[in-house]
Every structure is written in structure tokens, then in C-alpha cells.
Amino acid sequence: MRNDPASIAAAVLARVGGPANVTSVAHCMTRLRLGVADPAAVDGEGLRGLPGVLGVVADGESSLQVVLGPGVVVEVTAAVRIQVDEVAEVAEAHAVTATAATTATTGTAQPVGDLPVDAAGRQLKEQLRQRNATPFKTALRRVAAVFVPLIPALIGCGILAGINGLLVNAGWLPGLTPALAAVASAFMALIAVFVGYNTAKEFGGTPVLGGAVAAVVVYPGVAKVTAFGVQLAPGQGGVLGALAAALLATRVEKWCRGRVPGALDVLLTPTVTVLVSGLVTLYGLMYAAGVVASAIGTAANWLLATTGALAGLVLGGLFLPLVMLGLHQALIPIHATLIEQQGYTVLLPLLAMAGAGQVGAALAVYVRLRHDVSLRTTIRSALPAGLLGVGEPLIYGVSLPLGRPFVTACAGGAAGGAFIGFFAMLGDKVGATAIGPSGWALFPLLAGNRSPGMTAAVYGGGLLTGYAVGFAATYFFGLPRGSRAAASA
């Protein structure tokens, strides 16, 4: 019987130092992301041992990711937010009451009870956080936080675009296909606005101002503007331009907040932010981001056309470690840029092969360790999610704890990636019209420069290759000698 979300939320909070220790709550497709005030209060081992928790990833000194799996993570996150908000409201009420009582007694507001924290302790904690949170990793996580909330819409619109394409090719329902095209394409046409909104929100600006400046990128009227001797085109620079524009808007807004008198802030700060950031976006950022976006598309096409098998080998083999570290979401801007330019991302099918290798490795463990009832039960429960491209249950429940199967799973992913990359060198490109799903769940989103049947066949061949190599590598080399001897007894 599955635990209810409120019970899981309460158990998780109890092992991260209680609701009062939680500073932020968010989630992606499979993970609950928590910011904590005191990392020392987190019971990592107890958290990993909870029913329903598939794994725990340290995400810097003051944050962590609790792997719960698709679907359930949304419900648990909502329950966590409720419990954290309830405690925060009670604490705020107590603080107001205590401050009022202290002020009435002493005439000045003083810290009450356990609220003050030793300054030296705060300084040491900050030093530890900075030591562990490198600028590169922090930047990747923050960029990922901008795009992760957009994934559900990308998936839904991508699937609808695929269905509409099939209907158009088959000549079915001609009266419905224009409507489906509008529904599927509207989000991608305005994705820059959502990116700008989330960017300003993540980096400490006013979200709607970030969205307003990013909207310049997709406004049809930019076609009348000339920058660097070139007439701009609506959407030029895409999500990269929107990201840069919103980052600039956040910096301009913060600069204004510290210099504009309070009485004029509500009028001048938004005006200056939109004006300065909008003009810089038009006469600089859109052009620069367009050059970068074009370079990404050109590089991806060249990489697959000339070194496809090698590129697939490397990308498919290294993707599982990125997933383990929670850094794979940082690739979303590249995927989104390719989808804007070409209608699909050619990188996602290559990366999806990592999940195929993981499935093959898990099947080999299941066959070899037939006397390990607990592990085989874990594999049976996690395998359906793995087939659909959700790899965390198998990573944290099977391959990573055993050690070697994680490496052999990467070998399977490399083989599957090389298979798809080889066909790309032959001119058969396989892409995905949206990001998020992989495994068998990616089939409805497949697109390419050949027929749908050929595209699906190449992708399916990559999956089978990943399964086979992951299984064989794990079966023969992926288990310690003691484990193999026990299995064959």
C-alpha cells in the first residue's frame, strides 16, 4: 500500500531538521528540491531509508534533492509546502507577539529566545557553503531552475505537435489540424516570455519585468529594427536572448532600487528597467544571442554528421553521471534552442540511451542475483519507470549502491548513443520535438529528416543496443566476484 503524500512529506521534513529548517521548496519531474538553513541537521541516511524515497542527492552545502519518482513528487511537494507554510505562520505569529512583549518591557525591540544565531557560526557556515558551491555548479543549478518549470508545457505541446504531424501526413481531420497546430505551437512562440519571467524570479528581480523585457525578443515589431546593419527578426536569439535580457533587467532593476528615492521608485524603477534593458536587448543581445544560437545548431549538426558515432558514444556514456549529480537539467537551454531552430533536438535521443543502458544493467543484476529477494523486488518495481525513461529509481536503488553496474550501465548508454550517432553520419537524423521524456515514452515525440518509420526504427535500434550491451557488460563484468559466486551457487 502506497504511503499518502502527507505522511511522506512529514517523514521527509522530520529528517531534514523539521519544517523550520527548510528555506525553499521546489520540484522537477522526479525530485523534491529543498533548501535548508542548517545542513548539519539533515539526517541523510535516515532520509534514504524512508519508504518511497528512491535516493538523495546533495545539491551544494545548503540544498538537497530527494528522488521520489514521477507523479508522486508533485503531491509530496504540495504537502511539504503546506507543512512548511504552517510552521512559518506559527513562528511569525510567535515572533510578533514576543517582540511586542519585549518592546513593552524594555522600550526597544530585542531578539527573543533562540532566534539570534552566533555571528561566528554564521560566518563559518557561509564559508563552508561557498567552498562547496562552485560558481560553475551554482550557475548550472540556477539556469536549470529557470527551465525546469517549463518542462510540462514542453511535453504536452510536443506530443500534440507530433499527433498533428501524423494527422497532416495521413490527410486525416483537415478541419482539426489547424487548431491542433495553434494549440501546440503557441507556447513555443511565446516561450521567451516564460523564460524571462522565471529568470527574473530566480535571480532576485521582479518576475513580470523580466517577462516584459524578454517579450521584446518575440514581438513582431522588431522586424522594423536594424542592428549591426542587419534587420532583426522576431524570435532572433530565442530562449538564450530571453535569458540574457531578463538577467540584464534584474541587474538594472537592482541598481535602480538602491538609487531611486522611495517616493519615485514605483514610477521610475520599472520604466528605467524596461527602457534600458529593452534597448540593449534590441541593439545588442538579440543579435549576439542569435549568433550563439546559430552556432549551437551548426555545431550540433556538424558534430553528428562528421563524428556522430563518437559523439553518441561520449554523450550516451556520460549522461548517467550528470543525472546522478542533478546537473542534466542544465542542458535544457540547448535543447530548447535546437527545437526553436530545427523543430527538434538531435541531442536528446542520444542522451536517452543512458537510460537504456541502465535498464539492461538492472536486468542483468536481476538474472545473476536471483537469491537476493529484496534487490529483485526493487528492480521489478523500478523497471517500468526505467523503460519509460525515468532512471533515478534504478540508479539509486540498484546500480549506484552496487557500484560496478553503474559503470556497465554507462557502457550500455555509450553503445546505444554510438548506434544512433552512426546513422546520423549516414544522414538519418533522429530528434525529439520536446524535452522531458525518454525511453519508450519518447516515441510519440520523435522527429527527423526521414520518414517517421525510419526515425522510429533508428531510435528503437539504439534502445535495443543499449539494453543488450548494458546487460552483457553487467552480466559478465558488472558484479563483484563474491556476488557472482553467490548467484551461481
Image (tube, helix red, strand yellow):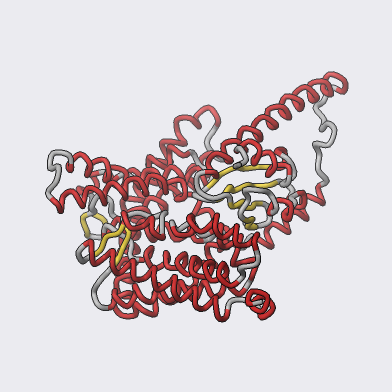
Question: Of 273 and 443, which appears nearest the observer?
Answer: 443
Q: Residue at x 73, y 59 (%)?
A: 128
Q: Residue at x 35, y 64 (%)?
A: 292
248 sits left or right of 84 in the view: left
Q: Residue at x 57, y 58 (%)?
A: 138
Question: Of 12 and 40, which appears nearest the observer?
Answer: 12
Quadrant in which the C terminus appears = bottom right
298 sits left or right of 323 in the view: left
Quadrant in which the N terminus appears = top right
Q: Is residue 315 visible?
A: no
Q: Give percent across and percent down for residue 262.
A: 55, 30
Q: Residue at x 63, y 36 (%)?
A: 6
148 sits left or right of 158 in the view: right
Q: Residue furthest right?
A: 105
Q: Give percent across and percent down for residue 254.
A: 53, 43
Q: Residue furthest top?
A: 104
Q: Quadrant of residue 153?
A: top left
Q: Give percent across and percent down for residue 232.
A: 24, 54
